[in-house]
Image (spheres, helix red, strand yellow):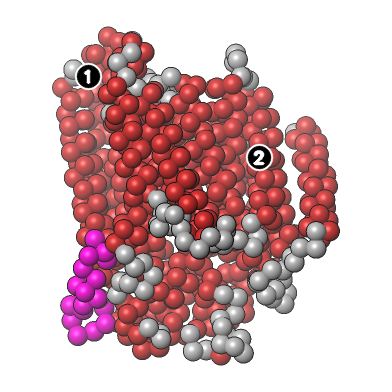
Amino acid sequence: MSKVIKLFLGYISGYIFLALYLSAAAHGAGGDISGAVVKQPLNVSAIIMFLIFVLATLGITWWAASKTKTKDDFYAAGGGITPWQNGTAIAGDFMSAATFLGITGAIYGFGFDAMILAVGVMAAWPVILFLMAERLRNLGSYTFIDVVSYRLDKKPIRIISAIGSLSVVIFYLIAQMVGAGKLIQLLFGLDYVYAVILVSFLMICYVSFGGMLATTWVQLIKAVLLLIGGTFIAFMVMKSFNFNVEAILSSAADIHPKGVAILAPGLWLKDPIAIISIALTMMFGIMGLPHILMRLFTVKDAKDARKSVFVATTLMGYFYILIIIIGFGAVTFVMNNPDYHDAAGNILGGGNMVALHLTQYMGGDFMLGFMSAVAFATILAVVAGLTLAGAATIAHDLYSKTFKKGPVSSAEEIKISRIATFALGAIAVVLGIAFEHQNVAFVASMALAVAASVNFPILIMSLYWSNMPTKGAIAGGVVGLILSIGLIILGPGVWVSVLGNAEPIFPQVYPTVYSMPLAFIAIWVFSLLDKSPQAEKEKALFDEQLVRSETGIGISGASNH
Amino acid sequence: MSPTETEKCLNHPKFKELIRARRRFGLVFSLIIAVGYAVYVLGMSFAPGFMSQSPGSGSMTYGIIIGVLVIISGMVCSGIYTWRANRYFDVLNGELRKELGHE
């Protein structure tokens, strides 16, 4: 334990040094820290509730650290999470700030079109349950990369999947960090740089000391708080309309400047290709998110993995229905309310603040403080999960299974994971500051597009197509990776918004409609072309993989790791 | 696991039944979700006129109804799958494992 304390202190002092250095650098560069977002006056009740949350989660981290001894504990909480806990934590990963604040704001602005962000998630999860969850749990130990490398040539397939996995983690981290910085600036009146450093610092504490156990509990507590808050707001909206859903919609259509058009398609997504591409990105991107798939390994067996996904799907579906009520309800109570607009008629804090304005309207300053603290907690919980997935990929898939010759002890792997966690935390701060003034929407779309075009095709084909050898998987991964990232760079998100060109070379924001099918075609073509003896051997191993994935026979030990 | 054990399991009638039943169940349910989602997405893309109509005299549109139905059917289908897997597939798998000498 004293070793852990020494490590803890070492990290903290190193971290404070880095934080001071970065903030000095940011000030020295004459950077306009507060940016376009107007800082809010200090919100005392929000800060008190947030401090309570931080203290409670640090306490949990302390407890989790004493239980985290082996790499099995670190990556997968020793397989000891119950399905209810795990399902709530998985749902928590989706009930993010982007969901609660972003989708509410998008429904408030665009109405019906924004619902696709919720419907897409709910189309993905049942399919994960029916086709993937149990088989993944039976085949892997810590990451989805364990599963794809089960019968293939371990090194190359781990490297390409790790590139896909880490790209997703880093893109997502950037989006979360920039969102966190702006949100905290808005909610608590804290400088952007300090906000980003604070998030990164807490996330490193949770992950490096408490591992998956702390990461799960942080996510679990936050998910419960967010469900309570969301239920309260949606209930108050319903009550204001005497529980008549029609009345919420017609009132919204009366007040919204676009009128009944908000109840119909067309305000946000204009052409069919754009709609289909975002639909594919949502559904299949989710099936390839490494930090989500990793949670399937924290329960004791395939049966519990199945139950966790059921719990998660149910909670998410419930929460998305709340969000739809809150989004349309907000139009009535926020849109014409001078309390929430500045003199020029712009909404205070921008579109993402709609959910919190409605919270204030329905529950007063106390409820606003509560939900602000929960929104911050949400970011912490999601970045912790992302960082843990990234650290597991670096330490387990790359260091231990690919580059290091000879066996790696559990202690050594945890050490590497901690170093990776610290490095990811530092990268998140640097990129968070670098991207402060960029529109980060494209970064989040990049994460899902890469997941849908690289991770998902390799994973689903390795589970179901016996004829895929390593070369086919690698070809699919490379094609998916180059196309998804390349087309995003040539698209409106980067080519126009970031690089300042007049016209995008590739017209769509989401490349998935091209990159995902082409990744599958590459897998198919290169698999058929590969007639080498190595490929025959890998194909022959499919039978054993099939038996293990369907029955669990062949897994040793009680915790199956 | 040795190749002979794998072979033995693959040819076991209960393994065949498990695979067949679970795959069919999983595929049918995935298809239900996929079709519902496709109706929603393709309706948005190619039939916005229909999606903006209301079945009654109120303001609830077909688009919103279909979207919410996809969300609810996701929850319901997950529940049915889990219920059946707990009661049927797990029992079958347990018998199979016992007969093959695992546990």
Count of all numbered marks drawn on residues in the image: 2
Dot 2, how many residues are within 10 Å of its Cα: few (below 14), some (14-19), or many (20+)? many
Q: Residue at x 53, y 56 (%)?
A: A494
Kindly identify which numbered label has been placed on residue A421: 2
Residue A169 is inside the magenta segment = no
Amino acid at dot 1: Leu
For residue B50: magenta? Answer: yes
- Residue at 48% x, 85% y is A335
Q: Is residue A339 above or below residue A531?
A: below
Residue found 27% across the figure and 82% down from its top: B59
Q: Residue A441 at x, y = what percent?
A: 51, 60
In the rendered view, would you say A232 is above or below A405? below
Disc nearest the viewer among 2 and 1:
2
Task: Pick whichever, B102 or B68, lies toward us.
Answer: B68
Pointer 1 indicates a residue of which chain?
A: B
Q: Is residue B89 above or below residue A509?
A: above
Question: In the image, is residue B80 above or below residue A530?
Answer: below
A483 vs A224, left or right, is left
Question: Mark 1: few, some, or many residues within 10 Å (few <14, many ≥20)?
Answer: some
Q: Which residue is mark 1?
A: B10
Residue A160 visible in this rendered orientation of the protein: yes
The residue type indicated by label 2 comes to Thr
Side (left or right) of A244 relative to A406:
left
Residue A232 appears in the figure: no
| Residue stretch rendered in magenta on the structure | B42-60
Q: Position of residue A401 (x, y in %)?
A: 54, 22
What chain letter is assigned to the residue under label 2?
Answer: A
The mark found on residue A83 in the picture is none
Distance of label 2 from label 1 (alpha carbons): 42 Å
**Helix, strand, or loop for circle 1?**
helix
- Quarter of the figure that contains the N terminus of chain A: top right
Q: Where is residue A377, by image quadrant? A: bottom right
